[in-house]
Image (cartoon, rainbow, N blue to C red):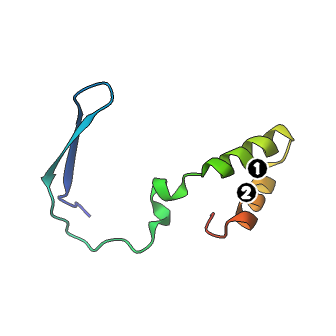
Amino acid sequence: IDCPFELYAARYSDSKWRLEVRNENHNHDHSEDMSGYPIARKLTESQQETVAAMTVAGSRPQEILSTLRQNNSSTS
């Protein structure tokens, strides 16, 4: 979509970053569905623990995903 929005990030110390909005304009509406964004697909700490425990127990990936979905309907 060739959106002109531009954000620049630069590290200026070991633990701090400087953010600069270079162009705040967008050529599209905001997204109503966040499922396509990586942050929306990030597992919670509890989900990570479930995955780890089920992996150690020898569960197949499909079983792990099914369990995650049963515990949280927004997991896709």
**What residue sits 75% from the left and 66% below the top?**
70
Q: Which residue is mark 2?
A: 65
Residue 48 position within the rendered picture, expressed as x and y whole percent measured from the top left: 66, 46
The kind of residue on which mark 1 rests is Pro
State whether residue 45 is above or below residue 70: above
**What residue sits 73% from the left and 64% below the top?**
71
Residue 23 position within the rendered picture, expressed as x and y whole percent measured from the top left: 13, 55
Relative to the observer, which residue lies in front, 44 or 39? 44
The kind of residue on which mark 2 rests is Leu
Q: Quadrant of the N terminus?
A: bottom left
Name the image quarter holding residue 55. Answer: top right
State the residue lying farthest toward the left. Answer: 22
State the residue lying farthest toward the top. Answer: 14
State whether residue 52 is above or below residue 2: above
Where disc 1 sits, the SS reads helix
Q: Is residue 66 left or right of residue 2?
A: right
Q: Are marks 2 and 1 in contact (CB under 8 Å)?
A: yes
Counting other residues with Cα less than 10 Å from the Cα at mark 2, is it few (<14), some (14-19), or many (20 or more)?
Answer: some
Residue 9 position within the rendered picture, expressed as x and y whole percent measured from the top left: 23, 40
Name the image quarter holding residue 62. Answer: bottom right
Relative to the observer, which residue lies in front, 45 or 25? 45
Q: Which residue is mark 1?
A: 61
- Compute the Cα span from label 2 to label 1: 6 Å
**What residue sits 82% from the left and 37% below the top?**
56
Q: Is residue 32 left or right of residue 4?
A: right
